[in-house]
Amino acid sequence: MKFACILITNLALASERRKNIELNDNQLVIFHEENKVKTVIENSLDSRTFFPKLTLKEASYKHPHAVFISADKIYYKQLLNSVADQLLLISPLIEINDQISSNRNCIYMSLSGLEKMYKTYKILEGHILKSIPKDLEVRIGVSNEKFTSHIAATIAPPNKTINIKKDSKEFLNDLSIDFLPINSTLKEKLYELGINTLGKAASLKPSHLQAQFGITGKVIWELANGIDKTNLKPYIKKFSVTENLVFERPISAMSILTAGIETIVNRAFLNPYISNRYVRLAKLNINMTNNHTWSKTIVFKEPVKCTKKAIFAINTALNNTILSEEIEEISMTFSAISNESGKQQSMLKSVRSQDQLRETILQLSKRLRVKPPIYKIKEIEPWSRIPERRQALVDFEI
């Protein structure tokens, strides 16, 4: 199988500049907190003097005039998913590998069968790059294995491709063991043993590495030899509709919040993906002053199809809610959208029609002396842009 790894190296920076265009001319440092330690994950400064994994305190000391922003991982993931949705139009099999805290966000794509649609890889590469927003910096690696394709993408120039046409082992031979997906302690031990390249690791017997590192030793040997049998974990588009509203000035009155919610609900239900369909979930996100946020997920008791019922259910869920700070912005995401209400409108009628259908099939089976090939259409992914994914034929059980 042929893989393409599409590595996005400035996901956080591009996301923040999308949210606030006034940041375009600023030096930005994006950080996140893990185990009470704040570290840098992306920056727009000179990479020769400024490295990811620098602590926020160190970064503040070195670059006091930069704008420091706490990572908005949910927003970054939404942008990554939107890119994946576009790439699904090229290949039906892709996998998202979102590692926002380590700036290793990538999308793997299966290229199997695409050679029949595109005469050359150069044409396919053009379609991939056109599918990705221009403000995102991507590097693409192509190989027969996921591991090798990821390394190729890592060392590729911005918005360019490295296509591994030769033997993967030969390509990996002189590369550092730092490319191995193992922790720093194990890498230090490899260096202590004089194993500093993938070629040296590949030249050893797997039993020697396994004796030193256990089952991980076998993985090290296989990857160093270009052996990677892992398959893609298919990304399935989770359809949702999001609307937001920014208030002209911070508000505190519940009546204004209610009016704002009504506005975005009405706007969302005009979206063609929701229109005349049923919604089961709604998530309200509120951004308050001092960068504080508040959210609430509303599960509708019965799936709703009209705005009045949705607004009533949301307002009911917000009864007795007290927010300690003024509100600057609200957004709402609607999901679990389907064509079916989830309600059994006429149980007796349904039972009768099912019994009649089963009786007819039984009579037909007796006449033919075999079970007739009768199927029913089952909705799988009604929102998919690929027609074959929307429904599937399944056996009708008698």
Image (cartoon, rainbow, N blue to C red):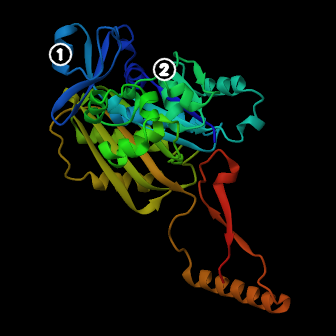
Residue depicted at 72% across the width and 24% down the height: 123
1 or 2: mark nearer the eye? 2
Q: Where does residue 176 sit, x and y in percent of width and height?
A: 40, 24
As shown in the figure, which amino acid type bears the numbered disc 2? Answer: Ile
Three-letter code, disc 1: Glu
Q: Disc 1 and disc 2: Cα gap in Å?
A: 27 Å
Identify which residue is drawn at 63% across, 44% down.
Answer: 92
Q: Residues within 10 Å of mark 1 (few under 14, many from 20)?
A: few
Question: Circle 1 sits in a helix, a strand or a loop, which is it?
Answer: helix
At 50% across and 27% down in the image, what residue appears? 172
Q: Badge 2 is on which residue?
A: 155
State the image coordinates of residue 226 (x, y, percent, origin top left): 52, 36
Q: In the rendered view of the protein, which quadrant contains the N terminus?
A: top right
Q: Nearer the viewer, residue 106 or 82?
A: 106
Horizontally, residue 359 falls left or right of residue 268, namely right
Side (left or right) of 240 relative to 364: left
Check contact, mark 1 vs mark 2: CB within 8 A: no
Query: In the rendered structure, which disc, 1 or 2, sits on the residue that comes first in sequence?
Result: 1
Label 2: few (<14), some (14–19) or many (≥20) C-alpha neighbours in 10 Å: few
Query: 230 above or below 71?
Result: below
